[in-house]
Image: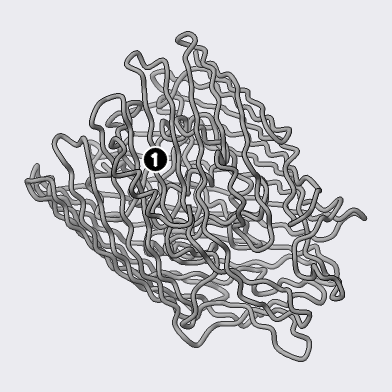
């Protein structure tokens, strides 16, 4: 269990992967292009992973961040229990270097400049696209490590009514319901999900259960009154109330700097998201123009047993005008896209002694993208973006990529790109009395890097093997320093480079219709100023094996997730200078099964952390042990 050898040995002996519940329509993605076109996954020269709704259903995904552990290049860190702060790092970059979209809406907290995946529970019908590598030339700031887009399915994609209810260990209940449908001109989908748990202790030797309540409500509407015009709207509400534990602050205590039971301490996070998009199609569909407006409104409040402790508000308003023209022949297909983006973010810090007025930042982005397909074998693209910011220096980012598929099913691909990440409001102006002071003189972080990969498809697509090598350099990295004599934390830009390189390996195959097999492995070497980066394990891997009975009434899925040894920082020194610590590697094993009682009614159950692994993802934050859940769901 302390090495990856046993996991790889098991994968070699196991049946290969197939998604019997998926069809060809699932293998398209939209995140890798600003045109809005759906693109076949197998044609993209970029590194992108698609987690389908069938994948999430087979693995009985309730917390979205859990299924992201199965993606090459992705590392997940959660502070203990469900609902705790959850960061996603892609290819060794930081958590705020990943752009997160939910149904096309930029979802990061405008105040922190990062999305907390601890607030995202899974919807009944959804999919996830994970685009890795520098993507700032398409999306601007934040997309240094890549883009994660969570997409709820439309009424046309998944019509009908569905409902789910389950309960289990740690006083946990979760459920969801969805209603969706379509007509000739209209399709709609409305869904809601909830996850409530009494939780488990997150302090070493602690006994306070750290619980949470999370609720999500989502709606999606598409109206197509004519062949040339389409109007879309998305709305989403997210609510999380989660207990948390603090670190011991008494310097005379033997537990100083460790997580300790903190009765009454919790946070409440509320977020509203909205989007409206109109699209006009002319010249027999060759020329499309879309106008989009979106907003995000986030509120986060922290409390102690004595009442309010800290808080912040964030708002984001975005507009985009995108126009794409397609031309060429059957052999040569060209696509040119131009876009203009406008974004305004507003912030307010409600913490005591901090400036509590509103501040803002505005940015214009000018985007150009070209995409080429030749003989359904050669695929290439290039994009460039100029960002004009009222607070930071203007910057240009770009990316070029190409791939070629040989007749025997072998594809070679490569890409080079640059990225940028603007400092967040908390880094610039955040304040916590005696603990943290922001730095208004911070510069944006910049990244450049390349990747090269090969993919081999066997037979008629029953098996695929892929390997990718990536190499990136980050400059002006923002880090935390502790200047004497007060040693109060404050951010600054490094004068040295940080480097990330790694290898991503995946296998998927379908030897028989009843078997599905997924294997992913990542080797990562990420160093900050020559020192190994924290919370970025050198080795991670996952294995999912699903079996479906011939009549499709019974299915079962085994999930193995390996997280290698990693480093973290601990504040156990009374001088408040951080100390580097090592967190042991671990393996999480889940087992789930489902049986269709009728065509509409199913019963299911699963065991999480089957081996009752004792592990930490963040220093001194204990995690849940073995748990069992069961429930029923209906689909009409």
Q: Residue 402, relative to residue 545: is it above or below?
A: below
Q: Residue furthest top?
A: 598
- Give neighbour class at mark 1: few <14, some 14-19, many 20+ (Cα, 10 Å): some
Q: Residue 124, relative to residue 305: is it above or below?
A: above
Which quadrant of the view contains residue 551?
Answer: top left
Identify the residue at horizontal 54%, vertical 48% (top origin). 294
In front of the other: 454 or 440 = 454
Identify the residue at horizontal 29%, vertical 64% (top origin). 469
Identify the residue at horizontal 54%, vertical 62% (top origin). 95
Give coordinates of residue 588: x percent, y percent. Answer: 52, 46
Give coordinates of residue 96: x percent, y percent. Answer: 54, 63
Which quadrant of the view contains residue 248?
Answer: bottom right
Give coordinates of residue 141: x percent, y percent. Answer: 48, 65
Q: Residue furthest right?
A: 306
Mark 1 residue element: strand
Q: Residue 458, relative to residue 94: is it above or below?
A: above
């Amino acid at each position: 269990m302390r090495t990856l050898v046993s996991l790889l040995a098991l994968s070699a002996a196991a049946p290969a992967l197939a998604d019997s519940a998926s069809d060809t329509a699932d293998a398209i993605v939209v995140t890798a292009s600003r045109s809005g076109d759906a693109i076949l996954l197998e044609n993209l020269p970029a590194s992108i992973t698609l987690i389908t709704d069938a994948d999430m259903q087979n693995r009985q995904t309730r917390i979205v961040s859990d299924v992201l552990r199965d993606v090459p290049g992705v590392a997940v860190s959660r502070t203990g229990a469900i609902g705790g702060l959850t960061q996603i790092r892609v290819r060794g970059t930081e958590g705020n270097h990943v752009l997160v979209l939910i149904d096309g809406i930029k979802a990061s907290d405008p105040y922190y400049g990062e999305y907390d995946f601890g607030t995202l529970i899974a919807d009944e019908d959804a999919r996830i696209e994970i685009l890795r590598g520098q993507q700032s030339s398409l999306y601007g700031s934040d997309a240094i490590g890549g883009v994660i887009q969570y997409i709820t399915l439309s009424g046309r994609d998944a019509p009908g009514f569905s409902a789910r209810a389950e309960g289990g260990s740690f006083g946990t209940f979760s459920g969801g319901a969805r209603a969706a449908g379509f007509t000739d001109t209209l399709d709609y989908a409305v869904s809601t999900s909830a996850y409530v748990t009494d939780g488990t202790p997150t302090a070493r030797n602690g006994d306070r259960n750290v619980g949470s309540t999370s609720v999500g409500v989502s709606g999606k509407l598409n109206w197509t009154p004519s062949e040339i015009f389409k109007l879309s709207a998305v709305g989403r509400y997210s609510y999380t109330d989660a207990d948390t534990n603090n670190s011991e602050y008494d310097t005379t205590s033997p537990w100083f700097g460790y997580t300790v039971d903190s009765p009454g301490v919790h946070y409440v996070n509320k977020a509203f998201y909205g989007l409206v998009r109109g699209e006009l199609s002319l010249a027999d569909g060759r020329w499309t123009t879309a106008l989009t407006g979106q907003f995000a409104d986030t509120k986060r409040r922290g409390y102690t047993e004595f009442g309010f402790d800290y808080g912040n508000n964030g708002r984001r308003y975005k507009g985009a005008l995108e126009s794409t023209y397609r031309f060429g022949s059957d052999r040569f297909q060209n696509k040119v896209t131009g876009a203009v983006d406008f974004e305004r973010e507003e912030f307010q810090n409600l913490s005591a002694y901090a400036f509590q007025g509103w501040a803002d930042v505005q940015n214009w982005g000018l985007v150009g993208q070209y995409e080429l397909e030749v003989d359904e074998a050669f695929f290439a693209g290039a994009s460039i973006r100029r960002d004009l910011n009222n607070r930071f220096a203007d910057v240009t980012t770009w990316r070029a990529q190409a791939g070629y598929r040989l007749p025997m099913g072998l594809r070679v691909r490569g890409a080079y790109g640059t990225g940028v990440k603007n400092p967040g409001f908390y880094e610039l102006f955040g304040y916590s009395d005696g603990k943290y002071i922001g730095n208004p003189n911070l510069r944006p972080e910049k990244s450049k890097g390349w990747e090269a990969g090969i993919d081999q498809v066997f037979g008629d697509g029953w098996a695929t093997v892929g390997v990718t090598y990536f190499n990136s350099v980050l400059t002006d990295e923002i880090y935390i320093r502790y200047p004497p004599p007060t040693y109060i934390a404050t951010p600054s830009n490094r004068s040295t480079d940080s480097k990330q390189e790694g290898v991503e390996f995946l296998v998927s195959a379908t030897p028989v219709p009843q078997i599905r097999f997924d294997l992913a492995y990542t080797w990562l070497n990420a160093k900050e100023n020559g020192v190994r980066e924290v919370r970025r394990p050198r080795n991670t891997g996952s294995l999912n094996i699903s079996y479906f009975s011939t009549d499709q009434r019974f299915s079962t899925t085994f999930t193995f997730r390996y997280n290698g040894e990693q480093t973290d920082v601990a504040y156990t020194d009374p001088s408040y200078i951080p100390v580097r610590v090592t967190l042991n590697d671990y393996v999480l094993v889940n087992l789930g099964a489902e049986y269709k009682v009728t065509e509409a009614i199913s019963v299911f159950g699963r065991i999480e952390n089957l081996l009752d692994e004792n592990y930490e993802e963040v220093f001194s934050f204990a995690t849940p042990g073995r748990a069992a859940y069961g429930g029923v769901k209906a689909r009409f």
